[in-house]
């Protein structure tokens, strides 16, 4: 009996151990399966994120490539646009120059001279005509062709003192010219030549419409005629500049010239040549010789031009009469600032610190004399416009009045201010 019980207990213990081992094995398998599932899930999740990351990186790469491509195309398109604009501007400039260049000529001033100066400095080679030698050269603009003659405008200082004038056309043809008339105040002269060889004349722009910043092209013969038809490009730097001019070289200003300023290069020899716009129209006549207190003033990037509207008015008068007739007082003038202060106080009985212009001489039967003005009177106003010097007075007369006009003159005599009415006469060059 006992043996049987022992045997049964033994069997039961064995079975319990077996079952426990089986249960542990089962739990172990179950844990392994659970870990495997977890590993699979983790792996799948990792794969998903990797795929997502790869997709994102790929998408960003495509976007970056596309953006770069778009940028490249934009830059390329912009460069093409700029190039096309530059090309268009070049074509406009070429067309303007082509239209105007044959209307610009070289002008040679021939004089009798005993100097040993080398003509090569002037014309790039020896030049002599009928015993006369070339002493200087400049430029000119053909502005009119009528019948057997053509007319050229240039600066007065280009032809001053000439005993003979030669004109060289743009194709190198040489012809003779004669002076029709000159105006020292605006520094303009008109020449007349045979029209046989003339095919092109210059069109005029309205200089009142010229704008600061617009294209300006200077055409002329800088330095010598071997450089004829030289073109320089710039802009209009300013309009209606007032430049003081000393006509008689006495270091006192006689006149204020109204000019257009440009940074297009204007060199000796360009005087009298053309400044044109991008339509090939004349803006004005180049004038290098601007004088200040008797000295020639030149500077880099600062050129002065007589406006085309004034050129037109002056040339019309010079063609008809050979001179420009302007309103005049019939007096000789001197600025108070140019006189000794003791003389001003003692003789004129006038405050030397004030501005004004003294009548050095009064012409008999002239406009001033008829109005009762006398020598040593000091003019301070014209029609209530302040007059500081002779240049002021002439500018007011030339630009604001005409012959026959009546003006109210304010003046000082013996220290007392007075007024008189004056009827303007004429001033012939």
Image: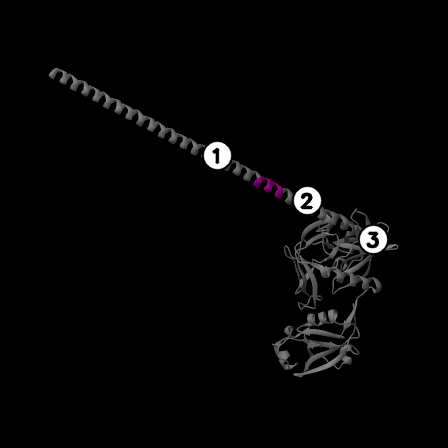
Horizontal and vertical percent for residue 271? 72, 56
Residue span colored magenta: 70-78
Pick the residue in front: 290 or 51. Answer: 51
Please report whichever mark, 3 or 2, sits nearer to the chain's N-terminal start: 2
Task: Please name which of the two marks, 3 or 1, marks the residue nearer to the observer.
Answer: 1
Res 260 visible: yes
The nearer-to-camera label among 1 and 2 is 1
Where residue 282 appears, as percent x and y from the top left, is 75, 55
Secondary structure of the residue carrying numbered label 3: strand
The residue labelled by disc 1 is 55
Q: Residue 176 shows which numbered tag?
A: 3
Which quadrant holds residue 382? Answer: bottom right
Instruction: Check residue 75 for magenta coloring.
Output: yes
Q: Report if residue 109 is visible in the image.
A: no
Instruction: Check the image and tell me how it is coloured.
Output: one colour
3D distance between C-alphas at marks 1 and 2? 47 Å
């Amino acid at each position: 009996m006992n043996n049987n019980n022992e045997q049964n207990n033994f069997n039961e213990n064995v079975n319990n151990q077996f079952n426990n081992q089986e249960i542990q094995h089962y739990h172990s398998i179950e844990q392994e399966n659970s870990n495997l599932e977890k590993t699979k899930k983790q792996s799948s999740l990792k794969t998903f994120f990797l795929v997502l990351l790869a997709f994102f990186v790929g998408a960003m790469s495509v976007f970056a490539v596309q953006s770069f491509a778009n940028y490249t195309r934009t830059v390329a398109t912009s460069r093409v646009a700029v190039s096309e604009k530059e090309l268009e501007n070049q074509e406009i400039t070429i067309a303007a120059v082509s239209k105007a260049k044959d209307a610009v000529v070289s002008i040679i001033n021939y004089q009798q001279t005993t100097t040993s100066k080398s003509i090569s400095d002037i014309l790039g080679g020896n030049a002599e005509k009928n015993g006369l030698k070339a002493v200087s050269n400049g430029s000119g603009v053909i502005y009119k062709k009528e019948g057997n003659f053509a007319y050229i405008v240039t600066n007065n200082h280009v032809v001053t003192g000439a005993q003979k004038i030669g004109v060289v056309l743009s194709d190198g043809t040489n012809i003779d010219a004669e002076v029709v008339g000159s105006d020292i105040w605006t520094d303009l002269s008109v020449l007349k030549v045979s029209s046989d060889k003339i095919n092109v004349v210059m069109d005029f722009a309205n200089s009142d419409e010229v704008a600061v910043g617009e294209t300006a092209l200077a055409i002329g013969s800088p330095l010598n005629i071997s450089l004829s038809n030289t073109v320089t490009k710039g802009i209009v730097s300013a309009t209606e500049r007032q430049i003081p001019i000393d006509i008689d070289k006495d270091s006192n200003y006689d006149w204020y010239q109204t000019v257009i300023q440009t940074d297009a290069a204007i060199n000796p020899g360009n005087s009298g040549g053309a400044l044109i716009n991008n339509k090939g129209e004349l803006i004005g006549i180049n004038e290098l010789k601007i004088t200040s207190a008797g000295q020639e003033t030149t500077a880099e990037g600062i050129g002065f031009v007589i406006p085309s509207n004034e050129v037109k008015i002056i040339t019309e008068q010079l063609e008809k009469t050979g001179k420009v007739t302007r309103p005049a007082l019939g007096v000789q003038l001197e600025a108070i600032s140019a006189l000794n202060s003791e003389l001003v106080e003692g003789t004129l009985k006038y405050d030397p610190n004030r501005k004004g212009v003294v009548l050095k001489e009064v012409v008999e039967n002239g406009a001033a004399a008829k109005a009762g003005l006398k020598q040593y009177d000091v003019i301070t106003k014209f029609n209530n416009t302040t007059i500081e010097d002779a240049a002021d007075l002439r500018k007011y007369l030339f630009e604001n009045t005409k012959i026959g006009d009546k003006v109210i003159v304010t003046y000082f005599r013996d220290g007392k201010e007075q007024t008189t009415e004056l009827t303007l006469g004429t001033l012939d060059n």
